[in-house]
Image: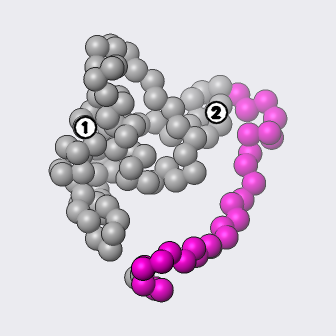
Amino acid sequence: MQGISNVKFRLSLTATPSPDDVDEMTSQSAVLGYGTRKEIIEKYMEMRKRRWTAVEPDAFYGFVCSWSCWVRKPSDVGCPDDDAKYELPGIEYTPVQVPSPGMPAAIA
């Protein structure tokens, strides 16, 4: 993030399909200057079952809420929703398992 360290005002937008993804949130935080990914992980996370998991979720999400803003449609920031085009349909989840050589068949 050294390339933007001298930028006074920053805006970082994401359209990630996983807004609760630790990698996504720590990367956005680093871009905005709220700490490096390593610092944030060391402070709030631990490795559990091959995934980063918040040790104290309230503290971690409190940190995220201190610098983030979630916007889904214009009315979230005070503008009118002129028609229904901003109403998103429900999400359909399709679980997919991809076998990997050398990996146990079931990982809990």
Q: Which residues are magenta?
A: 80-106
At which x and y percent is residue 69?
46, 36
| Residue 37 against residue 5 in the figure, above or below | below
At which x and y percent is residue 78?
60, 27
Image quarter hosting the C terminus: bottom left
Task: Look at 49% across and 50% down and name the residue there.
Answer: 19
Q: Is residue 72 left or right of residue 85?
A: left
Q: Secondary structure at mark 2?
A: helix
Q: Is residue 39 left or right of residue 17?
A: left
Query: What residue sits right under mark 1 in the picture?
Result: 36
Residue closer to the observer: 106 or 59:
106
Q: Secondary structure at mark 1?
A: loop
Tell how many labels.
2
Residue closer to the observer: 2 or 65:
2
Magenta segment: does it hold 25?
no
Query: What residue sits right under mark 2 in the picture?
Result: 75
Q: Is residue 65 visible?
A: no
How far apart are the two marked residues, 2 and 1, measured between alpha carbons? 32 Å
Residue closer to the observer: 51 or 60:
51
